Image (cartoon, rainbow, N blue to C red):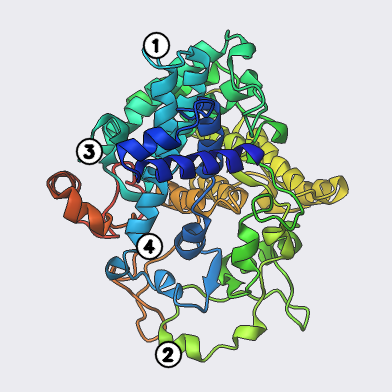
Amino acid sequence: MKKIKYIIAIIGLFAGLTSCDKQMEEMNTNPLALSTIPDEYLFTSAVHQTFGGVAYQLRFSSQYDHMYVTNSEDRAADGYQDFHSQDIYKEMFSVLYTGPLRYINEVLLMTSSTGKYPNPVRNAMAQIVAIINFAKATDSWGDVPYFEGAQGSIGIKYPKYDKQELIYKDMMDRLKKSIDLLKTADTRLGYVGSDPIYNNDLTKWVRFANSLRFRFAMKTRFIDPANSAKIITECMSEPLMELNSQNFELTHQESENSELYNPWYDLRKHKDYRMSEKLTEWLKSTSDPRLTVFIEPTSTGEFKGVPNGLNDHAFSLIDWGGFSNPSPTLYSKSLSEYQMTAAEIWFLRAEAALNGLTSEDAAQLYQQGITSNLQLWKVDSKTISDFMNTQPEATLNGSKENKARQIGTQMWLAFIPNFDEGWTNIRRTGYPEIPQRTNSTVYSLGVTNGILPKRFLYASNEYLNNSANVNQAVQQQGPDKIDTHVWWDVVGN
C-alpha cells in the first residue's frame, strides 16, 4: 500500500510538471527525483487494479448472474436495459484500458529485451497480468483493441479492434511462453517485494498461468474443439491450481483505511441489494451449508430471495424489507478478492473428463471442487463430510446432461463473489439455466426480448474518437447490442 501511495504521488508529480512550460519545468526539476516510474511500482499498481471495477460487477454481473437484485436505479440492468445514453459503458471501458492495461503494457515495454529495464522474468509475469485484463475486456465486449490496445504511450491513438477468436489464440500462446520461461527462472529476477499475490513464488505463477490457459481452452471448446483439445492436453502435462493457497487472491485487512479493506464493503454497506430468489432457493433445496455463509436471514428467520427481472409494477408490490440481505461475510472488510480459485479448476477438470477430453475421474474431481470451495468459506469439516455423504447434488448422478448441469451449477456457486466469471460461466455452459422471460405482465423483457444479455455495448466515446475501428468491429461481430453473442458463446439461448 505504501508503494501504491508512492506511485500515485509520482503520477501526480508528473501531471503537474507537464502542465508547466519548458522553462518552469527546468527550474523546478529536482535533480535527485525519479525521471521515470520504476517498473515494480507499475506492476504492483496494475495487479491491484486488475481487481477493480467492483461497482460495475455489482451493477451488471451480480444481476445478470442472478445472485443479487437491487432497488436502486441500477435495477435497470436486472431488467435487461442497455444504458447507452448514460455513458456507463464508457466508464467501464476506461476502467480497464486506462487503468491496469495501461500500466501493465508500460511494464511490458520497460522489461522487454529492448526496454529500459530488460528482464525476461518480470516480462513473463507482466504478460500474465495483461492477459487477465484483456480476457475481461473481450469476454465483456467481444472484439476489442488487443494487439494495439492500451498502447497510447507509443503513439497508437486509434487502436484497431481484433476478432475474439484471434485474441483467444494469442492469449493462450502468450501464456505458454510465460509458463515455459517461468518454470526454470531465477526467482531473484522476479518482483521480490512487489508481488501482492504470490510474493514472487514463481511456481504459483506457473500454476496460475497454466490454469488460466486451461480456462481459456475450456471456454472455447464448443466453438474450436480441435485446438481446445490440444491445449487441454498440454495443460494437463503442467501443474494446475489444486489448493486454496494457490488461488489468485488479493487479501484485505479489517481496517479503517479504505486503501486496505475490501472495496465491496463500501458498496454493500448501504443495504440496497438483496439476495436473488434463484440463488436462495437453490441453496435451500440442496441443504447447502453455504446458505448461511452467503445469506442473512430476514427478521422472521427466513431465507427469502427476490425474483430477478420483475417489471416496475410487479416490483412495487413486493415488501423489500422482507427479503434477505447478503451475509456480512460477503461484504466484510477483510474479505479477499479472487480472479481464480482452485475449485474452478477442479470443476473444469471434471467437465473435461465428463466429455472425454482427459482420462480423469469426473465424479472424484467434482467432489474435490465442492470440498475446495466449502473449505475456502471455512465450513467445518464435519459439515462438509455430512453434506458430501448425504446430499444427491454432492455426487455426480444421472445422465451426462444432468452431470453437466451439476458441474456448471457448482461452478456458478464457486465463483461467488467474482460475478463477472459467474455470468461468463452461464453464457459458456448454459448452467444454471436462465430461461427467456416471456410474461411481460410480471417481468421486464428489456431490449433483449427477455434473453439474458450476452455482452456490453461499446463505449460511446469510441464512436466519437475511434469511429472507423469500432464500426469495423460492429461489421465483423454483429450489431452493437447486448444480445449479440461473442465468438465463444454458442451454447446458451
Residue 183 location (% of width, % of height): 57, 12
Q: Nearer the viewer, mark 4 or mark 3?
A: 3
The Cα–Cα distance between marks 1 and 4, rounded to whole angstroms, is: 45 Å
Q: Nearer the viewer, mark 2 or mark 1?
A: 1
Q: Nearer the viewer, mark 1 or mark 4?
A: 1
Q: Are marks 1 and 3 in contact (CB under 8 Å)?
A: no
**Between residues 294 and 277, which one lies in front from this camera angle?**
294
Using residue 6 as the reference point, say whether residue 308 is left or right of it: left
**How packed is label 4: few (under 14 Cα within 10 Å), some, or many (20 or more)?**
many
Check disc 4 and give the amino acid type.
Answer: Leu
Looking at the image, which residue is at 36% across and 48% down? 491
The residue that disc 4 covers is 452
The Cα–Cα distance between marks 2 and 1, rounded to whole angstroms, is: 62 Å
Q: Which mark is residue 313?
A: 2
Image quadrant in which the C terminus is located: bottom left
Residue 357 in sight = no
Check disc 3 and give the amino acid type.
Answer: Pro
Q: Nearer the viewer, mark 1 or mark 3?
A: 1
